[in-house]
Amino acid sequence: MRPVLAVLVVLAGVLGSVSRPAEPTRPHREPIPLFNGRDLAGFHTWLVDSGREDPRKVFTVTNHMIRISGEGLGYLATDREYADYHLSAEFRWGGRNWSWGDRIGKARDSGIFLHATGQDGNSVDGKGAFMAAIECNVFQGATGDFLLIRGKDSEGVPIAPRVRATVSELRDPDGWFTWAPDGRSQTIETWGRLNWFAKDRNWSDQLDFRGSRDLETPGNGWTRVECICKGSRITIRINGTVANEVFDVWPSRGRILLQCEGSEIFWRNLRILPLEFAE
């Protein structure tokens, strides 16, 4: 092989190895605990005003639970990326007086971001508070909704999540679709919301709102959320009931984020399960 050609071949191999993304973690046979009950090992924090620093102690561990105070906009992110997994987690809301900013007096708000992609704080709509992702909403009266969070990569190229779903013909008062297992197929891309199947049409952004068919545990009880990410499909279960589902999902891998958006929330029993646990 000629010397110049040899150099080019080696260089191509090096560049290929640098640009190739690391394989996401896929659980097999045994569950993977995301939270060890003692500290935030395996996670990093992000706040729009302080980056990876957390001077206000927004993200802490107390009594074997993750506490997110809600003061500010940001998230707790897994250091690893995941694909083809069954996420199981439990949450409960904090005190009525633990709300901040424009969440004071309004419905308590958080979320689980799935397949979060790109650098920290790349979201367009959150002013750099979040990451491009597909969000499972954790929001009084709206827990189980899907939200598409758009962002930009390090070169400013848009990251525009997209999904397909079966939806009812009837839209909500804001014009968004509602999941219906036997409905027609609909593409949702770049930005939008897909309501869980029985979301109250009179939903209002008010503190402790509760719809007549809400699946979330009332009061201060624990609610179990399961996000089953199988290939390009995501299924959401709330307290054991399938609440929402999308397919032809892009992206289909990424980090998992627990959102901070103005409301105190506690998390426990966060684990990644092999997909056979979801059967």
Image: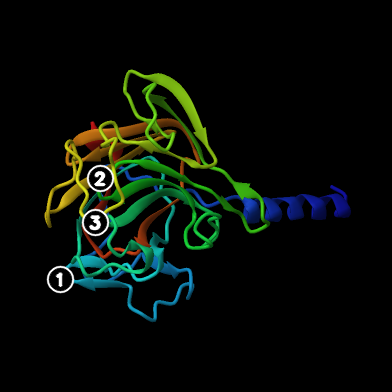
Please provide percent x and percent y for residue 63.
15, 71
- First reached walking from the N terminus: tag 2 or tag 1: 1
Viewer-nearest residue: 33 or 179: 179
Residue 275: horizontal and vertical position, in percent? 30, 37
Q: Which residue is mark 3?
A: 207
Judge depth for marks 2 and 1 and give the one in front: 2
Q: Tell which tag, 3 or 2, sits nearer the viewer.
A: 3
| Residue type at the position of mark 1 | Asn
Identify the residue under disc 2: 141
For the point 46% across and 73% down, the residue is 52
Q: Earlier in the sequence, mark 3 or mark 2?
A: 2
Q: CA distance from mark 1 to mark 3?
A: 26 Å
Looking at the image, do the residues carrying marks 3 and 2 touch, with CB atoms under 8 Å apart? no
Disc number for residue 63 = 1
Q: Is residue 193 left or right of residue 189?
A: left
- Looking at the picture, does residue 19 appear above or below residue 261? above
Q: Is residue 172 above or below residue 265?
A: above
Q: How many marks?
A: 3
Amino acid at pointer 2: Gly
